[in-house]
Amino acid sequence: MALTHMIEASPIADRYARGWHCLGLAADYKDGKPHTVNAFGTRLVAYLGEDQQVHVLDSYCPHMGADLSRGQVRGNSVVCPFHAWSWGSDGKCNNIPYSKRIPPKARVKSWPACEQNKLLFVWNDPENNPPLPEVSIPRIDACFSDKWSDWVIEKWTINTNCRELIDNVADMAHFPVVHGAPVDYFANIFQAHKATQIMIGSGTQGNQGSLATCATYFGPAYQITEMKGEMGGFPIDSILLNCHVPIHLKSFDLRFGMIVRKMEGVSDEMSQQIVAAYIKGIQQGFYQDVAIWDNKVRIDNPLLCEGDGPIYQLREWYRQFYLDAGEVPEEALKRQVVELNAGIPAPPPPHHVFED
């Protein structure tokens, strides 16, 4: 009787990962209006207060259920469009125009938020604990340098569980098949809340030439990739943003962004054309992944072979964000290095954000 590997898939746990989640460009939330954010199985409202900070609250008013993101911003508060109850940045109701007394329970959840690298982040924790300093989002100096372009960010809604995206960190074998990118050297490093992928290859479709990348997840949902490539004989340094926010258990918003070092020795017009073509080629690579995710099944016990990346180690690292902080095993936080030298011997590129 022939042996058959049966696909297993447990029900998805009703829980969202603990960590910082990127909501895109901070400037997009600074127009004085409340903004709707569908995330973590609910709806949030994000708005700029008079204190020049972006605040994030639960968006459903506990009075009669109206959507605060359809209301107005006044000072550091957002005012409900239904009965004009006013909710401060701390989540407390601070005014009811037709009542002298505010009910003691008149409070909505206030979500920790921060701004870094010109991006807005919101903190999710099922235990409602504040973020620890060691998981702070690191600064990228290039984001504030006139030698680099501004962020170019695309947003897509992907109708699957976000673990499918995370699997790419360890999935070396899909790069030549899906992206037409032969891999010469591949490695993963897992340590504490960070997971890094280092890859040296021959470029992707639409991006001819050498390619070296160092991609790190800082927590469960925010990945920065440092990439050195070339196009048309021109070397190109770029930094990629790959971040996602779960809408619910089977859907997430994916934001993919890039900044590119401005080119020297060519006209501004030619530089812009080369950079635009390069960004388009990299974006097309993400479209190729989406086409796979849209048609695959969730699998908890992938049947792996020699040459596959450390999928199980990656998933064990990722699982920490779905456990209570006190239940995360120490083994999951220890440093692990897995190398897959698929082609010619090649040392990994240095792990740092490109300096000016």
Image: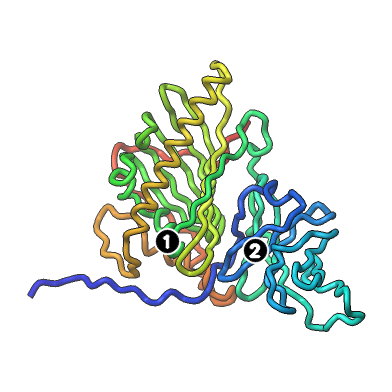
In the rendered view of the protein, which quadrant contains the N terminus?
Answer: bottom left
- Asked where in the image residue 122 lies, by quadrant, the reply is bottom right
Residue 124 image point, x, y percent:
62, 67
**Disc 1 from disc 2: Cα separation:** 22 Å
Which amino acid does the dot numbered 1 rest on?
Leu
Disc 2 residue crowd, few under 14, some 14–19, many 20+, Cα 10 Å: some
Residue at 79% over, 66% down: 79
Image vertical order of residue 319 relative to residue 285, above or below: below
Q: Position of residue 331 (x, y in %)?
A: 48, 68
Specify which label sits upstream in the sequence, 1 or 2: 2
Q: Give the quadrant of the C terminus.
A: top right
Task: From the image, state whether disc 1 or disc 2 is nearer to you.
Answer: 2
Three-letter amino acid code of the residue under disc 2? Trp
Q: Identify whether 16 is placed above or below 206.
A: below
Does 8 sit left or right of 103 as displayed?
left
Q: Viewer-proximal residue, 238 or 197?
A: 238
Report the residue marked by disc 2: 123
Q: Are marks 1 and 2 in contact (CB under 8 Å)?
A: no
Determine whether the residue tagged by mark 2 lies in a helix, strand or loop. strand
95 or 53: nearer the viewer = 95
Question: Could you tell me which residue is drawn at 50 percent across and 76 percent down?
Answer: 14
Residue underneath mark 1:
314
The front one of 264 and 72 is: 72
Up-down relation of residue 289 to residue 279 (above or below) = below
Q: Is residue 133 left or right of residue 89?
A: left
Q: Which of these two is toward me, 67 or 292?
A: 67
